[in-house]
C-alpha cells in the first residue's frame, strides 16, 4: 500500500501532470478528427479562408468620350514621392512599399459637346470648308491597374482597404501632374485634330480650318 | 518584364457606355489564434466603345458618307479605389495585407464582365457609337451618315437624320 501511495504522488506532480494533459489534448484532437474527417494535426496549421461578394448594378451611362492620348507609368510608393502630404502616414516608417501601375488619359468629353445648341457647335461648315473649334482637351480618366502582388514577386505590404484608398487618392493629383508635365494635353490636342482631319477628309472635305 | 515607355502615347478610342457596379466584399483568414477579417465595398466601372485606329470614312456619291468602325468591345474594367468604403477590419495577431483583398477584387472582374455582357452593355455602346459619330457629322451639316461595324458585330445601322 505504501508503495502505491508513492507512485500516485509521483504521477500527480511534475512532468506527469503535463503528460496527462497532453494525452487529454491529443485524445480530444483525435475525437475531433474522427467527427470532422479532417487530419487532426494538419488542421491545426491549416489556414481557413472564406469570402463573400455581393454585387449590384448601380448605374448605366451613355457617353461619347473621345480619348486621344494616354500616359502610363509605374511608381514606387513612397520612395518616388519625397514630398508627400504631411497627413499621409500610411506605410511610413514600416519599411514597406508598393509598386503602382497607373494610366492617365486625355481627350474630349463629347457627351456634353454633342448636345450643345446649333449656334454653339464646335464643328461647323461653310460651303466646302469645315471649321473645328474643339477647345482644349482635358484629363478624361485616371486608373490604377488592379494587380495581384503575389504574381509580381513584390512583398505583400500590410495595408487595409481604407489605407489603400488614402494612398491612391493622395497620389492621384501627383500622377496627373506627371502626365501634364509630359504634355498629355498638348499631345491629346494634336491627336484629336488628327482624328477629326481624317474623319472629314475621308468625307471629302479637304479644306479644314482649326480654330485656336 | 513589362516595359512602360515614359512618354505620352496616341490613343484613339470612343467610350460610349459605362456600367457602374457596387461590390460588397468580405474576406476572412484564420490560422491558429491569428484572425483577420475585412468588410468593405467599392465601385467597378465597365466601359465599352470602339477603338478608332481602324475607323474609315468613305464619301458616297450624293453627299453622304459611310463610316466603317471596328466592332464594339469592352475597353476596360476598373476598380475605383477612391470609392472604397471600409466597414470594419479585424487584425488579431496578423495584419491585413494587400493580397487579402486585391485577389478578390481581381477575381471579381471576371464575374462583372460576364454580367455586363449579359445585360447588353455592348449593344448599348454600339447604338451610342452610331449616335455619336452621326452627331459629329451632323454638326458639320453632313446629314446622310451610315455607320457600319465590321467583323463580329456586323449590325449595320443608319444614323437617324
Image (tube, helix red, strand yellow):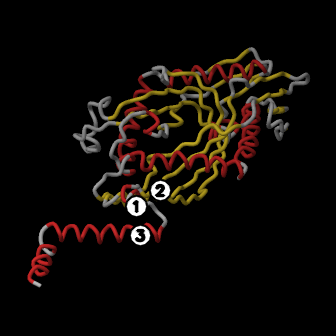
Q: Residue A3 or A144: which is nearer the viewer?
A: A3
Q: Secondary structure at mark 1?
A: strand
Which of discs 2 and 3 lies nearer the camera? The answer is 3
Q: Nearer the viewer, residue B136 or A63?
A: A63
Vertical order, A126 against B21 (above or below): above
Q: How many neighbours does mark 3 have within 10 angstroms: few (below 14), some (14-19), or many (20 or more)? A: some
| Outermost top residue | A206
Q: Position of residue B36 (x, y in %)?
A: 36, 57
- The residue identified by callout 2 is B41
Q: Nearer the viewer, mark 1 or mark 3?
A: 3
User: Residue B87: which disc?
Assistant: 1
Which is more toward the observer, B131 or A22? Answer: A22
**Sequence-wise, which precedes: disc 2 or disc 1?**
2
**Separation of residues labelled 2 and 3 (CA atoms):** 37 Å
> In screen coordinates, is A91 left or right of A57?
left
Is there CB contact under 8 Å for labels 2 and 1? yes
* Crowding near the residue tagged with mark 1, few <14, some 14–19, many ≥20 C-alpha atoms within 10 Å: few
Residue underneath mark 3: A32
Amino acid at each position: 500500500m505504501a508503495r502505491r501511495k508513492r507512485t500516485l504522488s509521483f504521477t500527480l506532480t511534475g512532468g506527469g501532470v503535463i503528460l496527462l494533459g497532453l494525452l487529454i489534448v491529443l485524445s480530444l484532437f483525435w475525437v475531433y478528427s474522427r467527427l470532422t474527417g479532417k487530419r487532426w494535426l494538419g488542421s491545426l496549421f491549416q489556414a481557413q479562408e472564406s469570402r463573400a461578394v455581393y454585387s449590384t448594378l448601380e448605374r448605366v451611362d451613355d457617353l461619347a468620350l473621345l480619348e486621344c492620348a494616354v500616359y502610363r507609368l509605374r511608381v514606387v510608393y513612397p520612395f518616388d514621392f519625397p514630398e508627400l502630404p504631411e497627413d499621409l502616414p500610411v506605410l511610413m516608417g514600416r519599411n514597406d512599399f508598393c509598386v503602382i501601375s497607373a494610366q492617365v488619359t486625355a481627350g474630349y468629353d463629347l457627351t456634353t459637346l454633342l448636345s450643345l445648341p446649333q449656334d454653339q457647335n464646335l464643328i461647323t461648315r461653310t460651303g466646302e470648308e469645315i471649321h473645328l473649334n474643339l477647345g482644349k482637351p482635358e484629363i478624361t480618366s485616371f486608373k490604377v491597374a488592379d494587380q495581384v502582388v503575389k504574381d509580381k514577386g513584390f512583398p505583400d505590404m500590410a495595408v487595409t482597404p481604407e489605407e489603400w484608398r488614402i494612398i491612391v487618392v493622395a497620389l492621384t493629383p501627383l500622377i496627373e501632374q506627371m502626365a501634364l508635365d509630359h504634355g498629355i494635353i498638348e499631345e491629346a490636342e494634336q491627336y484629336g485634330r488628327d482624328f477629326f482631319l481624317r474623319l472629314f477628309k475621308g468625307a471629302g472635305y479637304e479644306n479644314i480650318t482649326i480654330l485656336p | 518584364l513589362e516595359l512602360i515607355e515614359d512618354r505620352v502615347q496616341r490613343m484613339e478610342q470612343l467610350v460610349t457606355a459605362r456600367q457602374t457596379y457596387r461590390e460588397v466584399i468580405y474576406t476572412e483568414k484564420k490560422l491558429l489564434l491569428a484572425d483577420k477579417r475585412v468588410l468593405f465595398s467599392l465601385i467597378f466601372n465597365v466601359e465599352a466603345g470602339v477603338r478608332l485606329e481602324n475607323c474609315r470614312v468613305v464619301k458616297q456619291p450624293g453627299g453622304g458618307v459611310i463610316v466603317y468602325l471596328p466592332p464594339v468591345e469592352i475597353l476596360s474594367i476598373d476598380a475605383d479605389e477612391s470609392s472604397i468604403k471600409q466597414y470594419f477590419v479585424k487584425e488579431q495577431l496578423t495584419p491585413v495585407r494587400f493580397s487579402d483583398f486585391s485577389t478578390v477584387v481581381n477575381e471579381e472582374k471576371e464575374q462583372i464582365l460576364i454580367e455586363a455582357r449579359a445585360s447588353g452593355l455592348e449593344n448599348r455602346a454600339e447604338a451610342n457609337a452610331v449616335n455619336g459619330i452621326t452627331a459629329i457629322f451632323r454638326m458639320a451639316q453632313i446629314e446622310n451618315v451610315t455607320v457600319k461595324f465590321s467583323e463580329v458585330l456586323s449590325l449595320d445601322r443608319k444614323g437617324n437624320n
